[in-house]
Image: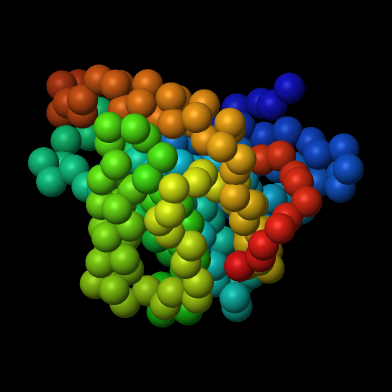
Amino acid sequence: MGVALKLSSTEAHQHRDPASGRWVVKVLPGGQHIGPQDNELIATVLGSCVAACLYDPVLRLGGLNHFMLPEDEAGLWGGASLALRYGNHAMEALINALLARGADRYRLECKLFGAGNVVQGMRGVGDRNAEFVRRYVADEGLRVISEDLGGHRGRRVVFDPETGQVWRRLLKSDAVGELARNEVKLRAAPPLRRETGSIELFDTEDGA
């Protein structure tokens, strides 16, 4: 059974993969994780959501986030797991977390995944997420090494934060249906409010 992480993660769980003997940190929507720690991998599953993998090749340090919607213009924070479901907060938080660990933003290599149009009745969400993240990385001057955005299928992504290598697998149609239903439930979470108080491992078909 996985355990919740408290240190360099938000909305993430980890488990031991018996085949490789490595820890795998699974990042959930509204989450991020920075590594490496203990020879770990970082994994996530995406439908219309987007994951950005950022990597400093000199420090051999990387991080992955997972956001659901493009941006929250109002900037209302209702706790990290809600705010980081928005791309503008999620990207800024991941960059700042890496810089706090000594990364240089001008060395950062960026790989982008997700933004599939998988939710019936919400076909534009994936497209809007892809448009947002492309615009964001261009505005911020981040160097995009590769991207796999769009289409109509979900993805599993595994990121090695020590080497910067990423593996991607497209999901089968039955898995996409369940993923889409889960995304709809998550989008029904309460809206952001201003505070009033103070992966599992798998054989990969494609690499990126």
Tell how many labels.
0
- Of residues 118 and 8, which is closer to you in this image? 118
Could you tell me if residue 159 is visible in this image? no
The percent position of residue 49, horizontal first and vertical second, equals 40, 44
- Say which quarter of the image contains residue 119: top left
Q: Is residue 49 left or right of residue 173?
A: left
Say if residue 121 shows up in the picture.
yes
| Residue visible at 26% across and 45% down in the picture | 124
Q: Residue at x 29, y 73 (%)?
A: 138
Q: Position of residue 183 (x, y in %)?
A: 40, 30
Side (left or right) of 31 relative to 80: right
Q: What residue is at 44 percent from the left and 31 percent from the top?
A: 180
Q: Left or right: where does residue 205 sit relative to residue 137?
A: right
Quadrant position of residue 78:
top left
Looking at the rendering, in which quadrant would you find the N terminus?
A: top right
Quadrant of the drawing holding the C terminus: bottom right
